[in-house]
Image (tube, grey):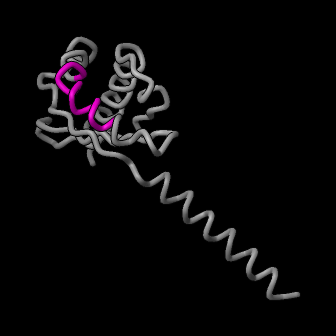
Amino acid sequence: MSYRMNKVDQELRKRITEVIQQEIDDPAMDFLSVTRVKTTTDLQESKVYYSLLDDSQYEKAQILLDKMRGFIRSSLGKRIHLKIIPQLRFIPDETIKYSVDVYKKLEDLKKLEGTDEN
């Protein structure tokens, strides 16, 4: 990825986070984190990956983000200076959950190995 696209993605992530935290008042969004943004080189679309502290809120958050997509995009237009504001596609980021699951499995394996030695 080019340096310019990396900077665009970082700026979009920062500004999308601001919009969600400051302008959307919904409990499902209280613990939402925008983890990364991947924008196409033509600036037509950005995949916005997010995670939540409460796994049970993903469905509600996805519905709300899809509904608020136009509002978030128009708010971005006021906060960021790009010729084209990309279309936003919100995607739950499973990497944190996956990492936690792998860590738990490794810990379980360590415990099993510890009991086998006795």
**Percent x, y of residue 34:** 40, 35
Q: Residue at x 63, y 64 (%)?
A: 104
Give whichever of 23, 47 is nearer the camera.
23
Q: Position of residue 114 (x, y in %)?
A: 81, 80
Point 73% across, 75% down: residue: 110
Residue drawn at the location 28% of the way across and 31% of the way down: 65
Q: Magenta: predominant secondary structure element?
A: helix
Left or right position of 40 against 23: left
- Which quarter of the rendering shows the C terminus? bottom right
Hey, which quadrant is residue 111 in on the image?
bottom right
- Judge left or right: residue 110 versus residue 60: right
Position of residue 37 measured from the top left corner of the image (x, y, whole percent):
31, 39
Residue pictured at 24% horizontal, 19% vertical: 76
Residue lying at the far right in this picture: please name it.
118
Q: Quadrant of residue 88?
A: top left
Residue 93 location in percent, x, y?
38, 48
Q: Is residue 65 magenta?
A: yes
Magenta-tinted stretch = 61-72
